């Protein structure tokens, strides 16, 4: 699985984040190279978690660099499968990746407590810890290696550590963005547990069928 790195601007667009959404406590889960948390800085109460944070700074830097090159090559080879309106061009997207990686590595060195190594479906946070929990490009993206039971357990865990909202993006598989056949079953299970599940269009699209996020309200 790739460890990607995305900026605050990408997170704002993918999750339709308003300034008020960023005022409470936030968890970026499966955060990868979380330039999101780095850019929010001291003004925010944001934490990133990812199993990759068990790696040293040098190991992570090497993995992020190799994964960035792979991402760039994939986007260049299959450019017509993606929508370039938001990024403009493969080169601009790649420059954003480089800047985001640098910001993440430098912030992790300065504020290591903001970056916690952990894996879904077991997070090391008490119940109701965060106002907003975000999870991008893990659930649904990696359908296949991660099956329906894993998704159900992961979503239940994201809800457990939230005291407000959980937002998930995208809701389709990696690559061509094929639908995930058990998405509606997962939404039904969330509703049956007493929460709301809504799907909202967002102002971001890179995979053609990835213009929607899920918002779970606890
Ligand atoms: C494609 S990256 C997405 C990173 C970031 N959210 C973004 O949008 O750029 C997927 C991330 O999920 C992490 N991951 C893999 N298995 C995980 C698990 N069981 N729980 C949490 N994160 C996991 C990987 O280490 C990787 O950083």
Image (cartoon, rainbow, N blue to C red):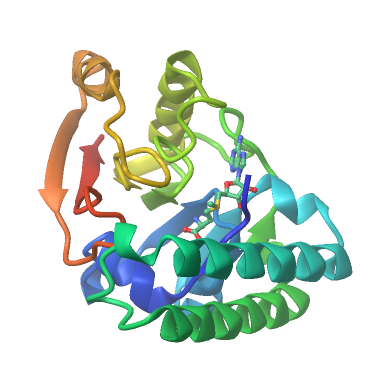
Across and down, in percent, residue 8 comes to 41, 75
Quadrant where the N terminus sits is top right
Asked where in the image residue 216 lies, by quadrant, the reply is top left
Q: Position of 103 compared to 173: left or right?
A: right
In-image side of 138 versus 17 (left or right):
right
Left or right? Give the position of 177 relative to 115.
left
With 26 as the anchor, is 102 left or right in this view? right
Q: Could one spot residue 150 in this view of the protein? A: yes
Q: Which residue is drawn at 19% across and 20% down?
A: 191
Write the residue at 35% across / 63% down.
Answer: 24
Q: Position of residue 35 (x, y in %)?
A: 54, 74
Q: In which quarter of the image is residue 108?
A: bottom right
User: Which residue is at the front of the view, 148 or 128?
Assistant: 148
The residue lying toward the viewer, choosing from 113 and 108, is: 108
Instruction: Assign the C terminus to one quadrant of the image.
Output: top left
Q: Where is residue 186 in the image (x, y as percent from the top left)?
A: 29, 20
Residue 186, above or below 59: above
Q: Which residue is drawn at 55% across and 60% down?
A: 47
Whether residue 117 is visible to the viewer of this picture, yes or no, is: no
Total numbered labels placed on residues in the image: 0
What's the residue at 74%, 81% (across, down)? 110
Q: In this view, does 209 lie above or below 148?
A: below
**Residue 176, percent from left and from top:** 34, 45
Residue 121 lies, with reference to residue 210, above or below; the image says above
Viewer-proximal residue among 95 and 201: 95
Up/down of 206 relative to 217, above or below: below
């Amino acid at each position: 699985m790739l460890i990607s790195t995305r900026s605050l601007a990408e997170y704002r667009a993918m999750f339709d984040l308003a300034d008020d959404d960023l005022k409470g406590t936030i968890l970026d889960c499966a955060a990868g190279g979380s330039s999101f948390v780095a850019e929010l800085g001291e003004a925010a109460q944001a934490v990133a978690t990812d199993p990759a944070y068990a790696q040293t700074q040098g190991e992570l830097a090497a993995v992020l660099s190799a994964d960035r090159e792979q991402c760039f090559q994939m986007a260049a080879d299959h450019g017509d499968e993606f929508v370039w309106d938001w990024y403009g061009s493969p080169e601009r997207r790649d420059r954003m990746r480089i800047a985001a990686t640098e910001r993440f590595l430098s912030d992790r060195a300065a504020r290591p407590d903001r970056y916690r190594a952990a894996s879904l479906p077991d997070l090391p946070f008490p119940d109701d810890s965060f106002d907003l929990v975000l999870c991008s490009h893990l659930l649904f993206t990696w359908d296949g290696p991660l099956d329906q039971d894993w998704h159900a357990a992961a979503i239940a865990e994201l809800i457990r550590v939230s005291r407000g909202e959980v937002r998930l993006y995208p809701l389709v598989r990696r690559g061509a963005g094929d639908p995930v056949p058990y998405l509606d079953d997962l939404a039904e299970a969330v509703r049956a547990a007493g929460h709301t599940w809504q799907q909202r269009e967002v102002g971001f699209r890179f995979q053609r069928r990835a213009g929607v996020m899920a918002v779970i309200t606890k």
